Image: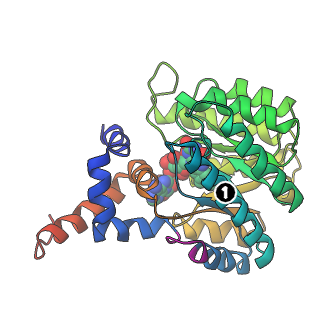
Amino acid sequence: MLRHSLLWLSSNPQVRGFAVHSSVGRQMARRFVAGECLADAVAVVRELNVHGLSASLDHLGENVSSADQARQATQDYIDILHRIKQEGLNANISVKLTQLGLGLDGDGVQDNLLRILAEADALGDTVTVDMEGSAYTERTVRLVLAARRQHANVGVAIQSYLYRSQADLDELVRAKVCGIRLCKGAYDEPPTIAFPHKQDVDQNYRQLTRFLLGSGCHPALATHDVRLIEFALQNVQDLGLGPGDFEFQMLYGIRRDLQERLVSGGWALRVYVPYGSEWYPYLMRRLAERPANLLFFARSLASEIVPNHRGA
Ligand SMILES: Cc1cc2nc3c(=O)[nH]c(=O)nc-3n(C[C@H](O)[C@H](O)[C@H](O)COP(=O)(O)OP(=O)(O)OC[C@H]3O[C@@H](n4cnc5c(N)ncnc54)[C@H](O)[C@@H]3O)c2cc1C
């Protein structure tokens, strides 16, 4: 219930306006977001690289409302790719197709994605397409499959909460899409298309992990769930795979202890590093994942509204 409400609030403009202007909102965002500008994100990635972790940079933004905004977001990503190269960072990028114009009329989104992929190809880098809400799943999969015909450096996120995900993976693996990122899924989806119970989402995650590890397509297992990580490592051992055959991925600001443990165990780990001023929907999805985050947020907010409020 709380999760549904938070995800609903993630698209509410009034609450968004309040949160982005509140110092508590911005403080809370800092836990999950590297900063507001590229220099902040570059500093975070450099530090991660020093400790043996790679990164994926996300310039926050989604659901743009004009073709100009989509073109600007595309250019921003191209600039990020050049900055990664100039700075010699071990990083790639993650893009949301609604930031590149999915949801607007016309073929702009496809052109924008292909421009980014061509630039990344020329610079020897890779691009992962984030998976958004189910209104976009089918078109995202189609656009990635079409892009794969021209560029081998495109990957995509697949969500284990969707019933359709095994069929999508079959098609993506057949088309030799590499770097598929398996996550549980962060949006509010109805039980007609998504498992409503966590244990079924986790069970599907296990099944899809086994499938991806056996596919030879260098998958990314994106989770902070220790039981699922242990399951993956058991499968890695059973299949005789090594650290070069797949990677773990986690979000900036979450389970740093686990990130360090995996890296010191010799496993490849990439941290998803979001930055930018459009952090509100991203923050709401992180709050929805863990009610304890919300409690902390609510207490801080109460003390901002009523300065000597001590929380309950
Ligand atoms: C690299 C990466 C990329 C992602 N890309 C996408 C995408 O493209 N599309 C999409 O829909 N989703 C994406 N997600 C989000 C994902 O779908 C889940 O919502 C999120 O990872 C939480 O699920 P979990 O696997 O960590 O398991 P959970 O069972 O939710 O959590 C396991 C444990 O992780 C910790 N944890 C998890 N979330 C939080 C949090 N917000 N705050 C603090 N601790 C937390 C807690 O200790 C928790 O007990 C991505 C996740 C990662 C790691």
Query: Neighbour class for label 1 at 10 Å: few (<14), some, many (≥20)?
Result: many
Assess whether residue 216 is covered by the magenta stretch. Answer: no
Name the image quarter holding residue 185: top right
Where's residue 12, x and y in %? 32, 44
Instruction: Please state if 136 lies on the left or on the right of 7 as rendered.
Output: right
**Among all residues in the image, which is located at the extreme top?**
192
Give the tally of numbered discs: 1
What's the coloring here? rainbow
- Amino acid marked by disc 1: Gln
Q: Is residue 89 visible?
A: yes
Residue located beneath label 1 in the image? 249
Question: In the rendered image of this protein, does residue 55 appear above or below residue 209?
Answer: below
Which of 102 and 127 lies nearest the eye of the viewer? Answer: 102
The residue range painted magenta reads 34-40
Where's residue 18, x and y in %? 26, 58
Q: Is residue 227 visible?
A: no
Instruction: Please state if 311 lies on the left or on the right of 150 as rendered.
Output: left
Instruction: Please state if 109 lies on the left or on the right of 127 as rendered.
Output: left
Where's residue 311, x and y in %? 16, 67
Q: Residue at x 86, y 55 (%)?
A: 121
Which of 91 and 249 lies nearest the eye of the viewer? Answer: 91
Specify the quadrant that holds the C terminus: bottom left
Q: Residue at x 19, y 71 (%)?
A: 304
Question: In the rendered image of this protein, does residue 206 appear above or below residue 96?
Answer: above
Where's residue 19, x and y in %? 30, 59
Mark 1 falls on what kind of element?
strand
Question: In the rendered image of this protein, does residue 69 appear above or below residue 298?
Answer: above
Assess whether residue 37 is covered by the magenta stretch. Answer: yes
Specify the quadrant that holds the N terminus: top left
Name the image quarter holding residue 174: top right
Q: Is mark 1 within 8 Å of ligand 1?
A: yes
